[in-house]
Amino acid sequence: LYIFSALGVLYCINLDTEKVLWEVDTLNRFKGSKIRWTLAESVLIDGANVICTPGGPDASVVALNKMTGETVWTSKGLSEASAYCSPDVIEHGGRRIVITMTAKSVVGIDATTGKLLWTHNHPTSYDIHGVTPVYADGMVYYTGGYGSGGGMLSLSEDGSNITPKWQDSTLDCQHHGVVLLDGYIYGTSHHSQRRGALNC
């Protein structure tokens, strides 16, 4: 069992023995910042790695060995603070890509090496990006609250860069995520004109 505390301590627990196998203070190791409402994300288990977002210099997103807690890679070139978003891994063009949101951006990172592939600027109030981006058919949808809304990014053939396709301010979901079903994206608004409404 892997638990990421509000203060950035990542714990690996053996459920049979009920003992902590290892723990890493990620804010200390990676010089991450203590954000306003403390860290809140579900870490991602990806093969031999556990991926999280301490938000440090050249280490916004990091991968640790899930058995030992040793550092596997850090997102060199990306130094934004964490933003309450749980990362995901997608497969596109023969490449596995970590997609998530940091304080100011939507980001794509090579899941094997930690190389920063692309970023897309998306400012929102209080740097809250609590909604994991959604991937389908070569495109990534992102959104944020406080009227900032979201948009669609088209990935290049190999996933190494993006092209913005469209933006929308009506669906400004702040937390809890959106649902993609049969080509439609559903979610609730936060501060848009239809505040609190279900949008499609």
Image (cartoon, grey):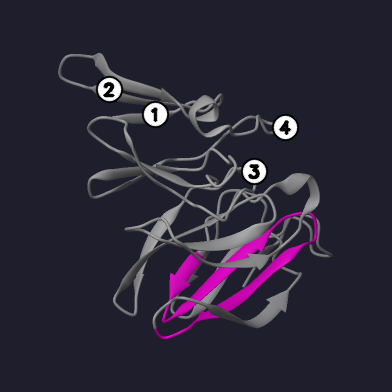
Q: Tell whether label 3 touches label 1 (CB within 8 Å).
A: no
Residue in view at x 41 percent, y 81 percent: 137
The picture places residue 81, in percent across and down from the top left corner, at 64, 43
Q: Is 98 on the left or on the right of 85, as rendered?
A: left
Magenta stretch bounds = 134-157
Secondary structure mainly formed by the magenta segment: strand
Residue in view at x 75 percent, y 69 percent: 170
Mark 3 residue element: loop
Q: Residue furthest right?
A: 193
Mark 2 residue element: strand
Front disc: 2 or 3: 3
Disc 1 from disc 4: Cα separation: 20 Å
Residue under label 1, please give it: 3
Q: Quadrant of the C terminus?
A: bottom right
Q: Nearer the viewer, residue 19 or 179?
A: 19
Disc 2 from disc 1: Cα separation: 8 Å
Q: Amino acid at mark 2?
A: Ile
Q: Is 16 on the left or on the right of 49, as rendered?
A: left
Point out the tag, 2 or 1, that comes first from the N-terminus: 1
The picture places residue 128, in percent across and down from the top left corner, at 69, 47
Mark 1 residue element: strand
Image height of 176 relative to 105, above or below: above
Disc 1 from disc 3: Cα separation: 20 Å
Mark 4 residue element: loop
Q: Amino acid at mark 1?
A: Ile
Q: Nearer the viewer, residue 167 or 197?
A: 167
Residue under label 2, please give it: 13
Front disc: 1 or 3: 3
Point out the tag, 2 or 4, that comes first from the N-terminus: 2
Residue under label 3, please give it: 81
Disc 2 from disc 3: Cα separation: 27 Å
